[in-house]
Amino acid sequence: MTDTPLLPFDALRPFKGKPEDFTPRDTLPWERLAANVLQCGPPEKGFGCLSPAAVVEGNIMWLMNNLSLPSGGTILDIGCGPGLYSNGLAQRGYQVTGIDVAQPFLDYAQAQAEAQGWSCTYLNRSMFALNFEGEFDLSLLINSVARRLTVDELHPLLRQINQALKPGGHLIGEFSVLPSGFETKQPTVNETVAFYQKSPWSTQFHAWMIRELAFPETRERVTHHLILEPDGQPQEYWSRFALHPQSVLPAALAAGGFRIKTYFGPMLGQAYQPDQYSCFVWAVSS
Ligand SMILES: C[S@@+](CC[C@H](N)C(=O)[O-])C[C@H]1O[C@@H](n2cnc3c(N)ncnc32)[C@H](O)[C@@H]1O
C-alpha cells in the first residue's frame, strides 16, 4: 500500500458537523481578520472581500441624490470597516463618525482621512453599545453583523440607532431576508475548497474550505469556514444568518421606531428581487 499524503480535505472532515448554537451569532474574529484583509488587495477592489469602489460610489451617489441631507449633515457609519463609505462621504463634506470593533480598520481609515484632509471621526465602539443621542441625520448599517440577528436581537440595536438619530433621520440598513424557494433547499448547499497565499484568514499559504449550509426548518443560512495552514490545526468559524420573511421587516423596524420607505436589491436604487438573501431598507425615524 502506498502512503497517500494527507489532503486538507481529510484533515477538515471531522469538523463537518452542524454548528452548535452560539451568541453572538458570528464567530468571525474581526480584530484579527482586519489586519489580513488590509493586505489582501487594493482598496478600489474592496481589498478582495468588501465592496469595490464602483459599488460604494454608486451607493454614495444614490444617498446624495435621494435623501436631501443638509450640506455638512451628520452621518453615523455603523461597522465602518476600513472607511470605504465613511471617507467617501467625508470627502463630500459630510461630518461622518465611523464606529467599528476592529482597530486595524479604524487606524487605516483614520490615516486615509488625515492624509487627504477629510474630517472624519473614528471610534472603537460596538454597535451593541452605541450611546449617541439625537446627533445624526443618517445612519448606515451596511454589510454588518445585523444580518446575523434574529428579529428579537434586532430590536435593541434598532432602538439604539433610532436614539442616535435626529427626529426624522434616515436609516439605510442591509438586512437578511428569506429568499423564495429556501424551504426546499438541501441542508448542505455548497462546498468549495481552494488554496491561497493570502486571504482574510492567513497571510501564509493555506487551504480555505467554505461550506454553505441551509437549515430550512429554522430559516437559517450558515457559512462555515475551515482554515488549514501547513503546520497548524484546522481552525473553524461560523457565520449564522437569520432569514426574515420580507413581510416581517416592517413590524421589526416599527418596534425599533422606524417607518420603512423603500426596499432595494444589492445596490441602492436597484429593485429588490425575491430570490435574494439580503435587501437594503431605507427607513425613517418616526
Ligand atoms: C463586512 S465588514 C463591512 C464594512 C463596511 N460596512 C463596508 O461595507 O465596507 C463588517 C464590519 O463590521 C465590523 N463589526 C463586527 N462586529 C461589530 C460590532 N459588534 N460593532 C461594530 N462593528 C462590528 C467588523 O469589524 C467589520 O469591519
Image (cartoon, rainbow, N blue to C red):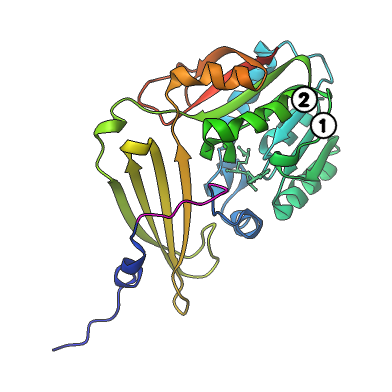
- Which residue matches tag 1? 132
Q: Quadrant of the C terminus?
A: top right
Res. 91 in view: no
Residue at point 73% right, 30% down? Answer: 160
Asked where in the image residue 273 lies, by quadrant, the reply is: top left
SS class, disc 1 = loop
Ligand 1 resides in the quarter of the picture at top right
Question: For the image shown, how many numbered marks are present on the structure?
Answer: 2
Give yes or no for residue 283 being in the magenta stretch. no
User: Is the stretch drawn in magenta largely helix, strand or loop?
Assistant: loop
- Comparing 103 with 61, the one in front is 103
- Residue stretch rendered in magenta on the structure: 18-25
Amino acid, disc 1: Phe
Residue 236 shown left or right of residue 77 in the figure: left
Relative to 25, residue 75 above or below: above
Residue at point 80% right, 34% down? Answer: 97
Q: Earlier in the sequence, mark 2 or mark 1?
A: 1
Relative to 85, residue 1 above or below: below
Residue furthest bottom as drawn: 1
Residue 158 shown left or right of residue 113 in the figure: left
- Which residue matches tag 2? 163
Residue at point 34% right, 72% down? Answer: 11
Amino acid, disc 2: Gln
- Graded by Cα atoms within 10 Å as few (under 14), some (14 to 19) or many (20 or more), the crowding at tag 1 reads some
Point out residue 284 in the picture as x, y percentages from the top left corner. 67, 14
Res. 252 in view: yes
Asked where in the image residue 221 lies, by quadrant, the reply is: top left
